[in-house]
Image (cartoon, grey):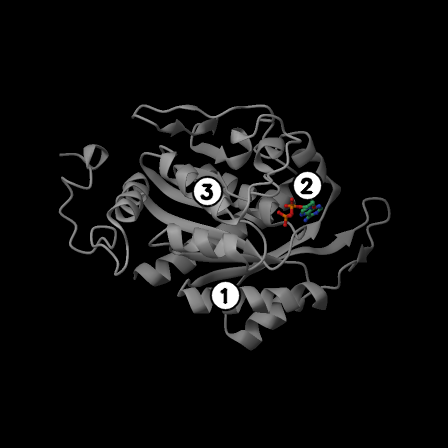
Amino acid sequence: MTEKNKTCSTCDSKTCSAKKPIEGESPQEHAERMALANRMCGIKHKILVLSGKGGVGKSTVAANLAVALAAEGNKVGLLDVDIHGPSVPTMFGLTGEMASPGHSQGAIAPVKISKNLRTMSIGFLLGHPDDALIWRGPMKIGIIQQFLKDVEWGELDYLVADMPPGTGDEPLSICQMIEDVDGAVIVSTPQEVALADVRKSVNFCAKLGVRILGIVENMSGFTCPGCGKTVDIFKRGGAEEMCAKLGVPFAGKIPITPEIVETADAGKTQAAPPADITAAFKSVARKIVEAIGRRSA
Ligand code: ADP
């Protein structure tokens, strides 16, 4: 039996937590948890990309991390589960794309971005890109669970999940639904108002037992293309200092550049941006892979 054909009933894993019902769990809830675990079973590494607040570049880092990992020859899935602002369709020129059926009953197939990179966005379930998601609490969580359960990823080296911002119910539920994650990447800008929220994300991970693979300082300095002078618009170095204080790994800095906005708005995140930006994201990806390696070692 190849890994590909493995199902929960043919799997002989002794450690899979999905097999055992949790106390108080109904048979229906257990069956759903098993179905989700089975979908994710062929994924070697799962990375959650979190931020304390919106607008700091979480989706940008998630997307570019996925692109950098795929460029190294890894099979990568980019899961956009940012239910209030799914940006992946725009960033990869997939606006208007709808989820299409997968091979197995009830499954949805990820969308191909490049040879090694596939994506699925909650945005593909919306009728129109401007449709707001107005589902209420439990319904929203149910839809997220259904969505996670239905995506047919197959075998992947890495799944990078672009999570909803903050530390509320939605990121909490998703963290609990995606079992066995390798850890989280937290994205912040360098100024104190953003860092205050990062500390909440760090505590959130600690409470859930999710390891922090690295904190990324985004929008860290701007070099004027005209005069070459660097201006620290949101300050610089704040996230790195915070990592040292909290004893969590620092994954690197990404400067502010107009090219990041332009490639995202043009739906060309997978196309090569300027070499220094590609190098900065590759360096972040290397640090995250190293952090995962330290865990597995
Ligand atoms: P979030 O997911 O945290 O809400 P996004 O990744 O959607 O944030 O980024 C918000 C906006 O900032 C987008 O327009 C994006 O292109 C832009 N942006 C993100 N990082 C940078 C950067 N390093 N330099 C310039 N613009 C950036």
Q: Residue drawn at (56%, 74%), measured in percent from left and top?
A: 244
Q: Is residue 244 above or below residue 268?
A: below
> Which residue is identified by label 3?
144
Mark 2 vs ligand 1: CB under 8 Å? yes
Q: Nearer the viewer, mark 2 or mark 1?
A: 1
The C terminus: image quadrant: bottom left
- The disc, 2 or 3, on the residue closer to the chain's N-terminal end is 3
Q: CA distance from mark 2 to mark 3?
A: 29 Å
Q: Residue at x 51, y 39 (%)?
A: 67
Q: Position of residue 74 (x, y in %)?
A: 39, 39
The residue positioned 81% from the left and 44% from the top of the image is 225
The amino acid beneath tag 1 is: Phe
Q: Residues within 10 Å of mark 3 (few under 14, many from 20)?
A: many
Q: Which mark is residue 61?
A: none
Q: Quadrant of residue 166?
A: bottom right
- Residue 31, compared with residue 110, is above or below; it is below
For disc 2, the marked residue is 260
Which tag is nearer the camera, tag 2 or tag 3? Answer: 3
